[in-house]
Image (cartoon, rainbow, N blue to C red):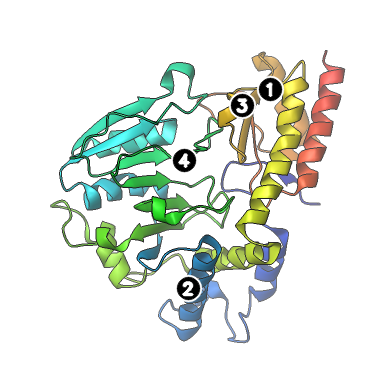
Amino acid sequence: MSRVYNFSAGPAVLPEEVLREAAEEMMDYKGCGMSVMEMSHRSKVFDEIIKEAEADLRDLMNIPDNYKVLFLQGGASQQFAAVPMNLMKNKKAGYIITGQWAKKAFAEAKLYGEAVELASSADKTFSYIPDCSDLAITDDMDYVYICENNTIYGTKFKELPNTKGVDLVADVSSCFLSEPVDVSKYAIIYGGVQKNVGPAGVVIAIIREDLITDDVLPGTPTMLKYKTQADNDSLYNTPPCYGIYICGKVFKWLKKMGGLEVMKQKNEEKAKILYDFLDQSEMFKGTVVPEDRSLMNVPFVTGDADLDSKFVKEAKAAGFENLKGHRSVGGMRASIYNAMPKEGVEKLVAFMKEFEAANK
């Protein structure tokens, strides 16, 4: 069986080179006689793996020295609670609702303090990013929260909100490492790695050091205090060792490819192939306003649910996997993360053209 083109939104496609290397090292990592899966997280060998992964990530993203990098567990969804628990000193925060995940984070924050909806694109099924140039942000807000790339709806903040000096927290799960970012613009930037970086089970959080204190909400679990994790270099308890090891390999692959500037160009090229086709197709239509389109997640529809199902079924038979849209919106979605080769997108578009001709 040859490999399929996997358009899954996550867990998602990984670079073949990384998978091959991991396969070669599966039984014996660099002559230590065991797999990384079996290795003590307190061992010298694993210590090198996690330190090197962090150094490569810092290098790729130009992470300033006053930010800590934490390798955590619990998915991005656990950060929906950890963020308010650690940051809500005034018990007030602003949320911009641009999709399902921001909505869930907002609902979670309400358990810990006053969460204020600053803007939302719910009125048009989250198909655009609201204007965030002059939001009703008040000085007493502890932070402003966004989900920067909306995996389900295929929108992306091209410009960060004007937070009027209030700290910005961003969930970047589905655009992590897809383009350069200025980390200093964020108080916390975090994401689940299972879309662009590694296997499910790791969350990377990059946190400005002044926010890492013992001054957290009463009742915050020890494991969810950023200080616990930072003081122990992400090794307070057994971390997801194998996942971190694969992330480290992906960081090396990204550096070898030329870094995040090069990835951005490649991602723009791939997305353009698909969006250009959608814009001229009579059958398939993109669902997002052009100026807010994500480079990572491309939702599209035919306008006919039966035809959508037929397309997903025939695409699967032709070797294009996981094109069904999220259960909450239907239609189709192609996730074209860093590791999706350009050829995969070209072949998908060729298949869509054939399907359109055959089903007119």
Seen at 67% across and 13% down, the residue is 304
Tell me the kind of residue under disc 1. Answer: Ser
> Disc 3 versus disc 1: distance between alpha carbons?
25 Å
Residue beneath the point at 49% across and 66% down: 58
Is disc 1 in contact with disc 4, using a CB cutoff of under 8 Å?
no
**Tag 4: amino acid:** Glu
Q: CA distance from mark 2 to mark 3?
A: 39 Å
Q: Residue at x 60, y 22 (%)?
A: 287
Marks 1 and 4, how far apart at CA: 29 Å
**Kind of element beneath mark 3:** helix
Mark 3–mark 1 contact, CB under 8 Å?
A: no
**Which residue is labeled 3 in the image?**
290
Q: Which residue is mark 2?
A: 50
Which image quadrant for residue 205? bottom left
Disc on the earlier residue, 1 or 2: 2
Residue on which the image places disc 4:
148
CA gap between label 4 and label 3 equals 16 Å
Secondary structure, mark 2, is: helix
Q: Residue 137's spot in the image, x, y percent? A: 26, 33
Q: Are marks 4 and 3 in contact (CB under 8 Å)?
A: no
- Distance between mark 1 and mark 2 Cα atoms: 43 Å
Element at badge 4? loop
Q: Of discs 3 and 1, which sits in the foreground?
A: 3
On-image quarter of the C terminus:
top right
**Residue 200's mark?**
none
Helix, strand or loop at mark 1: helix
Mark 4 or mark 2, which has the lower sequence index?
2
